[in-house]
Amino acid sequence: MKISKRLVFAFMKTLKYILLLFISLNCQYSFSQLYTEYAKGGTIDSLVQSLFASPSVQILNVTFTGDYNPWTDNIKDIGRFNSTNSSIGLDSGIILTGGWLEPPFGLGQPSFNNPQYLKTTPGDSILDQIISPSQTIGATVLEFDFIPNGDSIKFNYVFASDEYPDQICSPDKDVFAFHISGPGISGMQNIALIPNTNIFVGNNTINDTNYVLNPIMLTWGFCESLDYPQYYIDHGEDSLLVFDGTTTVLTAKSVTVPCQTYHLRFAIANGDLDIGESPAVFLEANSFNSEPLKIESKVSYGANDTILYEGCGSAQIIFRRTYNIQQPKTYNISLTGTAQNGIDYNNLPSSITMQAGNSYDTLIIYPTSDLIMDNLENIIITIGDTLCNGQYYETDIELVIHEKPNVDIQIVPDTGAFCTNVLFSAQAQGGLPPLSYNWNNGLSNTPIFNFYPSFQNAYINKTITLNVIDGCGNSAYDTTNIIFSKYPVAAYNYLPGYLDIDNPTVNLQDLSTIGVVSWLWNFDDNTTTSTLQNPIYNYPDTGNYNVMLTVSNQFGCTDSVSQIIRINDTPDLIYPNTFSPNNDGLNDSFKPLKAVGIETGTLKIFNKWGGLIYESNDFTEGWNGDYHKRKSSAGTYYWICTYSNVYGKEFVIKGFVTLFR
């Protein structure tokens, strides 16, 4: 029987849902996992107003299309969620799903697994256009009008799908959209876009092929993009979330005209063949805003923009407006908090005026040093205005004034002896950025200092200094003394220059310089070392030995040198004591019976009166018994052979030989 991959995937997901059900039955309610609750048809307006809106946006005319049960008033595919400390990335808000909710934990089983909960809602014609030629089923739609107070709106969301990761690049993809329409917008525009692109968010645009279980689908041509894995999170190992994958937290935004009416439509659905793998979109609680007024802070020393320090730097306070920019406007400033205007900081005005065409104005705060330990005084700056909806809107920013922190500095390393250049680093604590550095009166102005010593003697004792000044003018100083040493130079000689197995004793003579205090000889025979300065060593066998000398000075600086010392075989040369030159092929000449380790040799033969009758520089040539081409008489003759081995060592052997006729 052939089993399709789709059935295998469905079976694995069913196991996951069973595990979720088991967890929910055996655990108390805990917001470390996804908690859901049905929306009520009769209170859908209040749900959106309380869970999604903010004071800067007025929401009107909330409607929905979904799996609604009029007997219980439950909307089974729209609800509220809480996922504090879960892996979704949003703590709470509104959830819409192409499947159905199963309070209190997560989403229920796919509808095809449980006919009792078969979702019968139709698809959505607007979403159909996105996945054409496929069509949608089981659509959920939430829509409303809104009036923004500012020149833009935005909200945060996460898209989740059970088609991740095995069904990406499928023609029957999950689909959702946030369509906005109104003044200044041509038709309806989908604002669920990948950041800094015009690409719609979905399975086939945000994904990560590293998690794909069915790679052949990547070749079908339905993937609109594979370039944005940074916005994908795989949840395959998360047993508390039914979705195998989600996006990161994304932001939908659009330009608006303040005080004009717009329409926003949230829609989500399954592709027509994927009723068992439902998507969802999570809308962050109260993230839907259109700030008409905003206050920002930027401190001069580049740290936290809401923290100031007594007598140090300043903060630029930026007041922004996003409505009625073409009209001049004066805003009253409220200054509250424990810090006193004109005492703990410079005197600030009670109002600011933005001229026509200006969208912002600024003030500068200079915290003063009062020499009193009154840490954590705060300044609360508030402005507000009555907006087009008739409501008074306020925004504020809080700044906290700290005592000016001290800066502490330490040079690392701060002790030791070194045989080469040293990379010193500044270990700074406290203080405010930026920090300025001064090493050894200007040799370096960075947090690190690479010091290269120069020597007149074998070693020097060098003082390293560091002065640091922070962004508030506080200074710190550190100094250390470091020893820098030259490296010793290893060298040696040995005697005698020629060694063989009969005379294998080598005398090693240290010739090292520059403060050497210890020696280590390695004789390369796998057993023996010596710490003597001038050791004598007997080698037990012939061979080439790589003898290494390592020397150290008092500061641990080392150097090494090695040479090959050869222990030779003893040369061996043997001549006969008789020969008979009668051309019988046996012993017809006087020549060596054995010659081992011989490079060159000269043979001389004398008669009994001492006369030289034969001489040859080829000791192997042999004497045939002739003298001046006449046969020598039988008798005893004296011979001498002078020869050298392959290393030039000269030897002499001599003896008598008897010539027979």
Image (cartoon, helix red, strand yellow):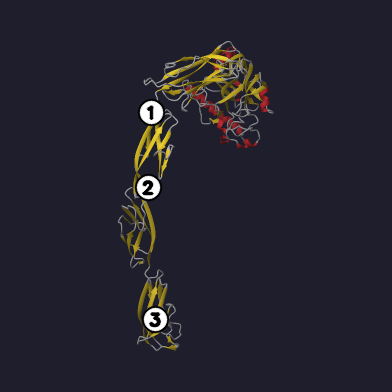
| Local SS, label 1 | loop
CA distance separating discs 1 and 3: 99 Å
The reply to whether the C-beta atoms of the residues labelled 2 and 3 are less than 8 Å apart is no
| Local SS, label 3 | strand
CA distance separating discs 2 and 3: 63 Å
Amino acid type at circle 1 is Asn
Which quadrant of the structure image shows residue 221?
top right
The residue depicted at 41 percent of the width and 79 percent of the height is: 591
Amino acid type at circle 2 is Cys
Which quadrant of the structure image shows residue 651?
bottom left
Which is more N-terminal, label 1 or label 2? Answer: 1
Residue at the spot of label 2: 419
Closer to the eye: label 2 or 1: 1
Few, some or many C-alpha atoms within 10 Å of disc 1 (few <14, some 14-19, many ≥20)? some
Which is more N-terminal, label 3 or label 2? Answer: 2
Residue at the spot of label 1: 406
